[in-house]
Amino acid sequence: MDENELKGLMLAVEVPPSSADVQQAMAAGRRRNRGRALLAAGAGVAAFAVIGTFVVTAPMRAGPHDTTGTPDSTAPAQAKSRCVPTLLKTPGGAPATVMTIDPDGAQVGGRLDVNPPQAILWRDGKVVDLPTGATGTIADVAGDTVVGYSTTPAEESTGWVWRGGKVTPLAKVKGYPWTHPHAVNAKGVIAGWVHGTKPDDTIPVTWSPDGTVHPLRLPVYRPGERSGTARDIADDGTIVGEADGFPMLWWPDGTPEGLGTPWGDENKNGIAWAIAGRYVYGSGDGVETRWVLQDGAVFSTASLPDAGELGARAGTADGTALLAGDGLEKPAGRIGLDDKGPVPVDELRGPDGEMTMATAISADGNTIGGTVLGGGRGRPTIWRCH
Amino acid sequence: MRGDSRAGDEPYVSYVTARLPALHRAAFLLCGGDAHRANDVVQATITRLYQHWKRVSRSDNIDAYVHRMLVHAVVDERRHSWSRVQLGGRPVEVTGDDPHAGVDERDSLVAALRRLPPRQRAVLVMRFLLDRPIEEVAEALNCSVGTVKSQSSRGLEALRSMLATIEERGDG
């Protein structure tokens, strides 16, 4: 049975008659929209509310960590208008996606969503001329180092780094035609992954500043499964990402450690998107999560407000988390560290209240990069928060 | 359909009416042949769609939004039990007392789909029934493109194996 035969079989399955009721859906939808409007009006009055549970665990070097309790599902209050959006201009008004922002918040990188995608970099809000070879998508920017990747006509992808006026290709791993850098630290070390010709053959890797590649060690979770990606790298070399679908951390010596979930269960799907200082941001078991590292161990795990499937996409060294939003119903937001008491979520909306997806945050947490959605196209945006 | 639509609702009603059979088929397969759950999922999806119709309807690709909503409705509907199922989990072995032995391949397909891990099932339905691009499936399921590819491959392989087993038992 091939893919077409499967489709044929799926279309031939006898499906019982549907009892879905369009009028009922419309009536329920109207009721819910009225309820949401009332909630939104009330949120301006309520300044603070309790957010997720902060669960402290015993420090340990490796292995599952023992957490207790379940996250509090109480909705956080919204603090509106503390983050002001500014749309970034693109050549010809082309749609674009923001992928990254540099630590000082002055440079924003991403791609124009045209065919093929074109790398774009804004510095202080203005489009920067890129050298030949810096094509495709900009994955990350740190100081004078810009990292990206592009797809070749041969259906492969190559990575590159632009530093000191020179574009250097990132080394490929033999047998892995897809190269996907994702983050670079202040020392110029790049984290990402390579993808092979087999469907599940993905290896997390780092590239040294000179472009040489080094595979990361993968833990063995399931027999026969060996896949993982590195999503961010701290200046000390700690790396976060996922392995076989589990949120994962690699210590600077290369030792992998499962991060687990807010419930303390290591055996759950998730991803660690970013690391800043002692905090790791991501999602575990479908819940936005902020992990805390201390003395070379995973110290604690906290759940964050629900902001869609992508979880906490980024964050800062002071514990401020960037909630990605789902682009549809749950807005992107910024939330500070709540270990000393409840804090509000700063909603990130478009200039006219549009839904957004946030991708990156500056080191001080006051500049955020993302994309305003609407009209079937993405508009690159930065928010300045105060 | 009762005639109590409000002015401005016609595009929504037209869209949903046209897509309802396809949505219901996708939901039925996503739910592993559970017709009651499929109805709930479709109802939740078209309700949510109505809530966001103003924005979604401006999209160039409404179907992409709706299919994502549909898959998320399945996830949300059984969020806790779903979350205990590993994305890369292995299909349950077909046992000797399979009640579906002897039924035709279409019914066997539903039985086989039911035995797949839910997210693997979602990958197959999104990719091969709904024709969603692989990147879109990855985004909807919050996983990497590589994971979608691997789950597609494993899902197909598992279905082939289970259908062959069911067929053998039917013949025997």
Image (tube, coloured by chain):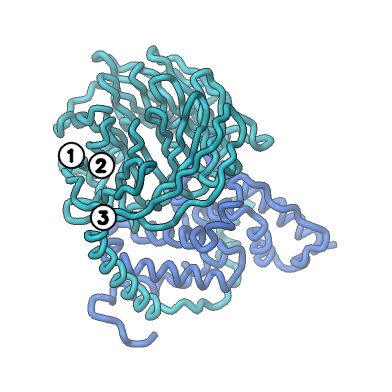
In the picture, one chain is cyan; tell me its letter. Answer: A
Badge 2 is on which residue? A96
Farthest residue, direction front:
A340
Q: Which chain is indicated by disc 3?
A: A
The residue pinned by badge 1 equals: A90
Query: In terms of secondary structure, where does tag 1 sit?
Result: loop
**Colour of chain B in the image:** blue
Would you say B70 lies left or right of A143 here? right
Residue designated by label 3: A47
Q: CA distance from mark 2 to mark 3?
A: 34 Å
Q: Amino acid at mark 1?
A: Thr
**Element on which disc 2 rests:** strand
Residue A342 vs residue A237: left or right?
left
| Identity, as a three-letter code, of the amino acid under mark 2 | Ala
Q: Are marks 1 and 2 in contact (CB under 8 Å)?
A: yes
Q: Residue at x 36, y 42 (%)?
A: A340
User: Could you say which quadrant of the image residue A21 lies in?
Assistant: bottom left
Residue A49 position in % (x across, y down):
33, 55
Whether the residues at callouts 3 and 1 have beta carbons within 8 Å, the answer is no
Residue B87 position within the rendered picture, expressed as x and y whole percent measured from the top left: 58, 47
Is residue A188 visible from the viewing direction of this image? Answer: yes
Label located before the other in sequence (2 or 3): 3
Tell me which residue sits at (36%, 24%) in the image.
A184
Give the CA distance from mark 1 to mark 2.
Answer: 7 Å
Tell me the crowding category of disc 3: few under 14, some 14 to 19, or many 20 or more residues within 10 angstroms, Cα based: some
